[in-house]
Image (spheres, grey):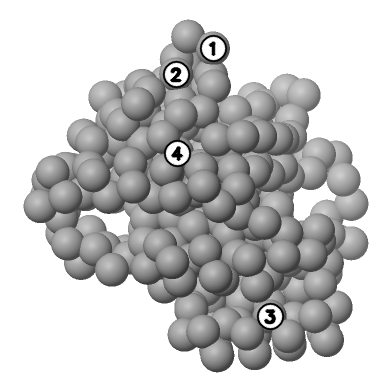
Amino acid sequence: MVKLSGFADEISPDLEVQLDTLDELQIRFLELRGVWGKNVLDLDDEELGKVQSELRQRGIGVSAIGSPIGKVDIQSDFQAYRSRVQRAIDVANQLESPYIRMFYFYCEDRDADRDEVMRRMQAMVDMAAAGGVVMLHENEKGIYGEQPDRCLDLHETVQGDSFRATFDPANFVQAGVKPYDEAFPLLKPYIAYFHIKDAVMADGHVVPAGKGNGQVRELMAAAQEMSYDGYLSLEPHLRVAGHSSGFSGPELFAVARNALCAILDDLDIAYE
């Protein structure tokens, strides 16, 4: 049985509204990226404690920390950046999240920077392993891991069980890639998590699951064949699709949830 989750900051910056909407939509997990207008890694200890308390009261778990780790220039001071990585690990442990979402780095010359990218990624994965959590790399347009072959290179190079993939079909579409046909066959062995958003190849705009060129139905059928029982995390971006986040509002978040569930129901995939 797959588990529904989602970036609840797309519903509202207010935690209560986020959790009320998840309750209404019968979604028992969230991918925590932001609350009260702050990124999850920027919450102070008091704020983080409040989030933890509210989640426990509502019976809502954290499927992943939706961190921006890795969304920095490859030339940045990595030694200083390690404190940001450690903060993500500490937050994940406090909120009992098994995963941390991460990215490659921004590079001017991806071929020239390849070895440094791998070194830094391995260092972050080693930190995650020491902290007992798993780093999930998300493919995204504009960073080193934009294309499937570079994602594959990463997963073949970086070692350890604390490194897996988040598969985002819309991000592949926006990079000119057919997700199921061109990316999934390469990355299938490494996928531990799915982001659910769809996009139109012609202009990259984001649409509900099954309404674009993200091949979401084919991906869900393939996930069923591989007995996938992990998370499907809604990241709708139906009103605003920003560089580091998106926004949908409660109504459009419900549209996104219903579009995904229609696909799952049609394929007879059980979900909770």
Q: Is mark 3 on a helix, strand or loop?
A: helix
* Mark 3 or 4, nearer chain start: 3
Give the alpha-carbon distance from disc 1 to disc 3, as whole Å: 37 Å
Type of amino acid at the residue the image marks with label 2: Val
Q: Where is residue 149 in the image (x, y as percent from the top left)?
A: 44, 29
Disc sitting over residue 203 in the figure: 1
Q: Going by the image, does 198 lie left or right of 81?
A: left
Q: Going by the image, does 167 lie left or right of 124?
A: left
Residues at circles 1 and 2 in contact by the CB criterion of under 8 Å = yes
Residues at circles 4 and 1 in contact by the CB criterion of under 8 Å = no
- Residue 134 in sight: no
* Mark 4 or 1, nearer chain start: 4
Residue depicted at 21% across the width and 34% down the height? 218
Q: Where is residue 245 in the image (x, y as percent from the top left)?
A: 68, 44
- Compared to residue 163, the image places residue 166 above or below, namely above
Type of amino acid at the residue the image marks with label 4: Lys
Type of amino acid at the residue the image marks with label 1: Asp
Q: What element carries label 1?
A: loop
Within 10 Å of disc 2 (Cα), the crowding (few <14, some 14-19, many 20+) is some
Location of residue 242 by image quarter: top right
Residue depicted at 87% across the width and 45% down the height? 76
Residue depicted at 55% across the width and 70% down the height? 20
Q: Which of 118 and 103 is in front in this view?
A: 103
* Mark 1 or 3, nearer chain start: 3
Disc sitting over residue 51 in the figure: 3
Give the residue at mark 2: 200
Q: Nearer the viewer, residue 46 or 103?
A: 46
